[in-house]
Image (cartoon, rainbow, N blue to C red):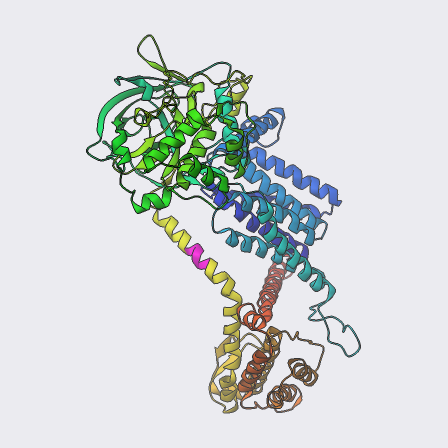
């Protein structure tokens, strides 16, 4: 394999290794195999065109054309000519897929489903563009150092989006690929001059330094790795969906709950409330006597990081026939079971199943899964509510104010999980909560005072025409400006309740709809709503209504305090503000074709999120276990290789002793002083090669001595004689007289086996090397000692040896092939003897 071909292979591997940082973002991770194949084709086309050779721009153009044809074959073959040549229809289809991918990135949580062709196109297309850039820079223009920039961009994007704890692993993988690329380029350049261990001395009598390409490669590597570590830290935090800054709330995916943030979800919900036409989302019929409390809940958001609320990642199970009693609900609380039949609109595709809370049973067609903590249902493998009609049995829980006031302390687990507030939350939140609830004796009284503060006497105004805040300061800004809509009110009250030690979360769904003449209730876009739920032991999760002019205040929060009674608004949820947007927002599940037809609109700042499935298949467990072993083993490979090589070299004395005594032994392969591959020979043949065994032993010990010095910072200089090299090691290592004698003894043994007519093995050479190693270890700093063991410099010989063996193997096969070809080409008139 030529140096250019080896460099192209390393560029392919480096791109693929950097792409591994994207693995946590999409599930399943099988796309990486497809990316490997497509990148291999792209790299092969580059290698072929460079052999012609074409001008460099033509090589890049050929690779770019093949990349486009490959993407057309995978994603738009039905719209392309002959399935591979892109035309106008193919470009239009790819454009639609990219648009769909952008929408899916906004609404899916990490990890997003691979079934989305748009996301898959963005993944594969992005990786192939990075691969083209790396191949162009590193191979076509023969400049591997700048090729680290696209690799850095790929890793930084993945690290910025991912919020997992294994980012360091993907950094190591990506960094390893880049360093491998630099090493391959340096070796390809230096191979034109032969193997170089050191450059010229910096000054007369000075020590040789690394050659310029090696020094440059080291500096570039250090700078690139440093930037790769720092850049992701400087990127804005992106939590939740694949792109929180572009997201619309709770996402989808089989692994991680979605999000609703303090930024764009506000915009999305505001747009739903401001539509000109209040499109019907669902129609329902219920046997409840009071539909004013019939809130339709989709999901609860209980994980708060200071600026974002999201559902916690939880396991899901099969849908039970009868749901368990809600957490915390005591037997003495009055309740009634009601039945509600819900019919979702044909355009409304929601992965979470809208239901009254708390549900006690559900009869719904399709494949659904049950999340027991939030008592919610989520569609399995793309199941949605589009056009579904289903029956929900739910409990109408009717606690009294006395039961809430007398509620005991919540369980420790509930208090721990639902009163968390990160340090980034402004202090004004807790300060305002204490001021508002001053004089309250119980958590219930504090909750009512908070509700009254927002809905009645705090001077807050309901409006969807507000500037949406961002980051942890959004709540503080809302408390100052006192203007917002339901998400502002629910987020602020939940955060303030947590600051007081009251377990709280935010529910997202629909406020009570509008009664119709046929006895049904119509729930429209303008009914989209969010409200806080607070936990009281003996009652469970309890709804509060802090948003003025929206929904209905629960009866158990009504107080007799003058001036603080909540307004009795029977149907306020239609009031969404005077101004309206020109068009409805996007549906929770809307294809690019539907958007062109304006056939979908958004009803909530949430879309879909699928919690984790319980349990993992055995093959996934085995795969992760194998990956864990590789993660542990890979960083230790240099140390293990070096320890093995040291053991083999220093214990080879027994072979020399056997040769000297004329006994049957094992003959080393003299092709390399580092290779102790052996064969067993009869006694009568041993005398002829005893000297070879002795020489092999001494040279192996000498190589171990110089490599040990290299590990501790003394770079070998193969241009020096053994005697001068030993003197150099003694001087640079500042070795004492006894150790210096040991080093010179090994050097003398090397000269003796190289030049004496009958070489003999000096005893104790292995002990001399061990003595020098102990002395050097005592002279250097602790970081140098650790590096000498964990990441020894001389371990690079493993790479050199592998390349040498590969070159030798190719030469042998070429020789055999030439011999075979000569037989085939024998002239027809030649007679065989």
Looking at the image, which residue is at 53% across and 48% down? 21
Q: What's the residue at 27%, 27% (across, down)?
A: 362
| Picture residue at 61% right of the left edge, 54% below the top | 10
Can residue 646 be seen in this snapshot? yes
Which residue sits furthest left? Answer: 332
- In the image, 251 versus 673, the foreground residue is 251
Magenta span includes 629: yes
Q: Quadrant of residue 216?
A: bottom right
Rendered position, 513 above or below 313: above
Q: Quadrant of residue 396?
A: top left
Residue 301 as seen in the image, left or right of residue 818: left
> Farthest top residue?
517
User: Which secondary structure dominates the residues rendered in magenta?
Assistant: helix
* Residue 444 appears left or right of 219: left
Task: Name the quadrant of the N terminus.
Answer: bottom right
Image coordinates of residue 344 in percent, x first then y, are 37, 20
Task: Point out residue 562 in the picture as x, y percentages from the top left corner.
Answer: 36, 23
Is residue 567 part of the magenta span, yes or no?
no
Residue 601 visible? The answer is no
> Picture coordinates of residue 123 (x, y %)?
55, 39
- The outermost residue toward the right is 204
How many numbered circles are shown? 0
Residue 520 in the image: state x and y as whole percent.
32, 13
Residues drawn in magenta:
626-630
Nearer-the-camera pick, 629 or 748: 629
Compared with residue 481, is residue 215 higher up or lower down, i.e. above or below? Answer: below
Q: Nearer the viewer, residue 354 or 58?
A: 354
Image quarter where the C terminus lies is bottom right
């Amino acid at each position: 394999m030529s140096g250019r071909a080896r460099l192209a292979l390393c560029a392919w591997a480096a791109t693929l290794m950097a792409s591994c940082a994207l693995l946590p973002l999409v599930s399943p991770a099988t796309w990486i195999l497809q990316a490997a194949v497509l990148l291999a084709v792209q790299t092969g086309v580059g290698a072929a065109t460079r052999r012609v050779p074409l001008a460099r721009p033509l090589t890049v153009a050929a690779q770019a054309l093949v990349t486009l044809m490959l993407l057309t074959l995978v994603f738009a073959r039905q719209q392309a000519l002959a399935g591979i040549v892109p035309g106008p229809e193919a470009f239009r289809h790819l454009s639609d897929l990219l648009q769909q991918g952008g929408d899916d990135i906004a609404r899916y949580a990490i990890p997003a489903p691979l079934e989305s062709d748009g996301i898959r196109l963005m993944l594969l297309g992005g990786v192939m563009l990075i691969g083209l850039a790396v191949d162009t820079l590193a191979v076509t223009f023969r400049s591997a150092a700048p090729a680290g920039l696209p690799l850095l961009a790929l890793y930084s994007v993945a690290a910025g989006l991912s919020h997992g704890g294994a980012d360091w692993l993907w950094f190591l993988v990506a960094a390893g690929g880049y360093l491998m690329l630099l090493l391959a380029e340096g070796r390809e350049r230096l191979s034109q001059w032969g193997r170089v261990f050191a450059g010229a001395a910096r000054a007369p009598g000075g020590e040789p330094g690394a050659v310029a390409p090696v020094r440059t490669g080291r500096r570039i590597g250090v700078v690139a790795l440093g930037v790769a570590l720092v850049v992701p830290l400087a990127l804005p935090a992106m939590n939740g969906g694949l792109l929180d800054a572009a997201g619309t709330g709770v996402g989808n995916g089989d692994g991680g709950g979605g999000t609703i943030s303090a930024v764009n979800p506000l915009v999305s919900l505001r747009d739903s409330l401001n539509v000109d036409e209040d499109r019907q989302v669902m129609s329902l019929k219920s046997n409840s006597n009071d539909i004013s409390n019939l809130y339709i809940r989709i999901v609860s958001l209980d994980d708060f990081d200071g600026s974002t609320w999201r559902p916690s990642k939880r396991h899901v199970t099969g849908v039970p026939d009868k749901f368990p009693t809600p957490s915390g609900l005591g037997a003495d609380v009055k309740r009634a079971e009601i039945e509600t039949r819900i019919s979702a609109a044909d355009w409304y595709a929601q992965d979470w199943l809208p239901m009254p809370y708390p549900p006690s049973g559900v009869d719904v067609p399709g494949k659904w899964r049950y999340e027991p903590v939030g008592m919610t249902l989520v569609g399995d493998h793309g199941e949605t509510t589009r056009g579904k009609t289903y029956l929900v049995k739910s409990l109408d829980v009717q606690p009294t104010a006395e039961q809430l006031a007398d509620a005991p302390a919540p369980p420790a687990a509930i208090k721990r999980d639902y009163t968390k507030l990160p340090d980034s939350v402004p202090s004004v939140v807790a300060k305002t909560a204490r001021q508002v609830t001053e004089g309250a004796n119980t958590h219930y009284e504090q909750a009512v005072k908070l509700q009254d503060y927002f809905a009645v006497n705090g001077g807050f105004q309901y409006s969807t025409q507000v500037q949406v805040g961002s980051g942890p300061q959004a709540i503080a800004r809302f408390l100052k400006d006192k203007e917002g809509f339901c998400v502002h009110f629910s987020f602020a009250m939940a955060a303030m309740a947590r600051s007081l030690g009251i377990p709280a979360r935010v529910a997202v769904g629909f406020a009570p709809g509008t009664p119709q003449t046929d006895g049904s209730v119509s729930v429209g876009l303008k009914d989209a709503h969010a409200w806080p739920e607070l936990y009281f032991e003996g009652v469970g999760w309890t709804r509060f209504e802090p948003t003025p002019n929206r929904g209905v205040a629960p009866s158990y929060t009504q107080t007799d305090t003058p001036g603080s009674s909540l307004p009795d608004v029977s149907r306020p949820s239609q009031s969404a503000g005077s101004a309206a947007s020109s068009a409805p927002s996007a549906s929770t599940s809307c294809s690019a074709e539907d958007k062109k037809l304006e056939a979908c609109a958004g009803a909530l700042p949430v879309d879909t999120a699928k919690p984790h499935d319980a349990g993992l298949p055995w093959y996934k467990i085995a795969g992760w276990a194998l990956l864990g072993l590789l993660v542990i083993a890979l960083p230790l490979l240099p140390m293990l290789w070096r320890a093995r090589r040291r053991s083999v070299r220093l214990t080879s004395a027994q072979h020399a002793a056997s040769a000297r005594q004329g006994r049957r032994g094992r003959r080393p392969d003299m092709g390399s002083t580092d290779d102790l591959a052996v064969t067993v020979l009869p006694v009568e043949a041993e005398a002829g090669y005893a000297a070879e065994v002795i020489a092999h032993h001494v040279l192996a010990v000498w190589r171990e001595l110089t490599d040990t010095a290299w590990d501790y910072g003394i770079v070998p200089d193969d241009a020096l004689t053994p005697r001068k090299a030993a003197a150099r090691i003694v001087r640079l290592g500042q070795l004492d007289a006894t150790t210096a004698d040991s080093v010179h003894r090994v050097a003398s043994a090397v000269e003796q086996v190289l030049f004496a007519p009958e070489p003999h093995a000096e005893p104790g050479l292995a002990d001399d090397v061990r003595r020098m190693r102990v002395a050097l270890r005592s002279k250097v700093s602790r970081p140098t000692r650790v590096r000498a063991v964990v990441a020894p410099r001389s371990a690079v010989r493993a790479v050199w040896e592998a390349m040498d063996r590969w070159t030798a193997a190719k030469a042998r096969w070429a020789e055999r092939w030439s011999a075979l070809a000569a037989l085939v080409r024998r002239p027809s008139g030649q007679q065989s003897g």
